[in-house]
Amino acid sequence: MDNKKQSFETEAIRTQVDRTQFLEHSNPLYLTSSFIFEDAEDMRASFAEEKQRNIYSRFTNPNTSEFVSKICNMEGAEDGYAFATGMSAVFSTFAALLNSGDHIVSARSVFGSTHTLFTKFLPKWNISTSYFKVNEIEKIESLIQPNTKILYAESPTNPGVDILDLELLGKIAKKHKLILVIDNCFATPYLQNPIRFGADLVIHSATKLIDGQGRVLGGVVVGNKELIREIYLFSRNTGPALSPFNAWILSKSLETLVVRVERHCENAHKVAEFLEEHEKVNWVKYPFLRSHPQFEVAKRQMKLGGNIVAFEIKGGVKAGKKFLNAIKLCSLSANLGDTRTIVTHPASTTHSKLSEIDRLEVNITDGLVRISVGLENVEDIISDLKQALGSN
Ligand SMILES: Cc1ncc(COP(=O)(O)O)c(C=O)c1O
């Protein structure tokens, strides 16, 4: 692969594995589980990693390599590995890098399944986690123990759209020799590059804006070469690899990432401004609205505000449910980062099993609504939200 550094958009389109003898223009799909060897010596040398070549698609495949190369270029990372889902990327990172007795310091507001890993599964291997609130970042140092190995956060957070100061996290991680892992899913590699601020590893659920069309699941981890080597060795043996078909889809999607994300952000900003003026809305959180508590930090570390808008509808759970029932154009779905606008009400759905006190700990109030703003005409999105708010 030609890895000459060009502009973001050009690399997203022009990074491509070597052409076959057919000189295809667009990269084909390498739907093969394994690769053949010229002779016994070639096979031996390949397994001994004396040669860099494809052996088996659980290890590498031309489609996954192309996808990983693009994400590495976009994030300014040395190396990476692609996974079947965002969650397999998150889990494999912890499983590969941590030992029994190790400790994680994490923001409390993280994606639900990541939180479940911290509370339910990692403790089975004697790995513990301490949490800091997104607005109490100054408390992080007091949570660090001699056995702390990873500092973990998302920014913007899911579903509250809070922003964490990546530069500050980078400084803390460096000072205490921690591995800083950032889930960059809401920002995409176009809007924010955590490695610039000191992150060692960056994780994406490629299921979201990277696919962008709600078709396939995928995940990726990129960053420091030595750490990726550990993650690769773990994954090559445990098998969470991304399928070549999904890698092919995701690599194609990256060709249009910039134009899609720019329009997503433009639409989301307009939706946020509309909601901010609405009488049935208590507050709106969108990183590039002046009213966002971390507006200045968001401006420093993100190109645009992203496509997720959170707001609180007046009237709590009852009003939230009524709003969802009145929605006509937008979808009620668990995904985000799709071309289609998606509306969710965490208190009555994804987080309904938590007590109100536990929900408030992570800023999920009863009236919180999360919108993943899509690529429909923004006037149509706004008019759907307007009529649904009118039903309350
Ligand atoms: C911030 C974040 N991280 C990780 C994930 C998990 O990704 P996946 O669904 O691809 O496993 C999600 C999914 O919503 C997410 O929002």
Image (tube, rainbow, N blue to C red):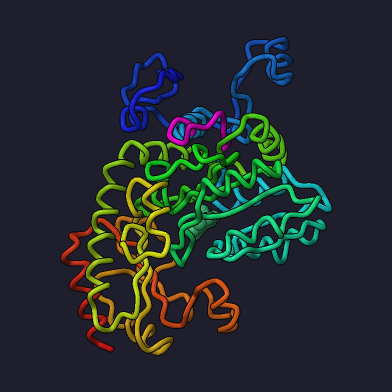
194 lies left or right of 38: left
Residue depicted at x 54% and y 46%: 203
Residue 123 lies, with reference to residue 83, above or below; the image says below
Q: Is residue 35 magenta?
A: no
Residue depicted at x 74% and y 58%: 122
The quadrant in which residue 36 appears is top right
> Horizontal and vertical percent for residue 115?
62, 64
Q: Viewer-proximal residue, 285 or 221?
A: 285
Q: Viewer-proximal residue, 375 or 134?
A: 134
Residue 33 lies, with reference to residue 148, above or below; the image says above
Quarter of the figure with the C terminus: bottom left
The quadrant in which residue 290 appears is bottom left
Give the magenta part as a residue range: 72-81
Q: How many marks?
A: 0
Q: Residue furthest left?
A: 379
Residue 103 lies, with reference to residue 325, above or below; the image says above
> Horizontal and vertical percent for residue 370?
39, 69
> Horizontal and vertical percent for residue 189?
42, 42
> Horizontal and vertical percent for residue 103?
76, 54
Q: Viewer-proximal residue, 147 or 56?
A: 147
Residue 372 appears in the picture as rendered? yes
144 lies left or right of 340: right
Residue depicted at x 78% and y 54%: 145
Residue 342 lies, with reference to residue 211, above or below; the image says below
Residue depicted at x 73% and y 61%: 121
Q: Is residue 80 magenta?
A: yes
Residue 30 appears in the picture as rendered? no
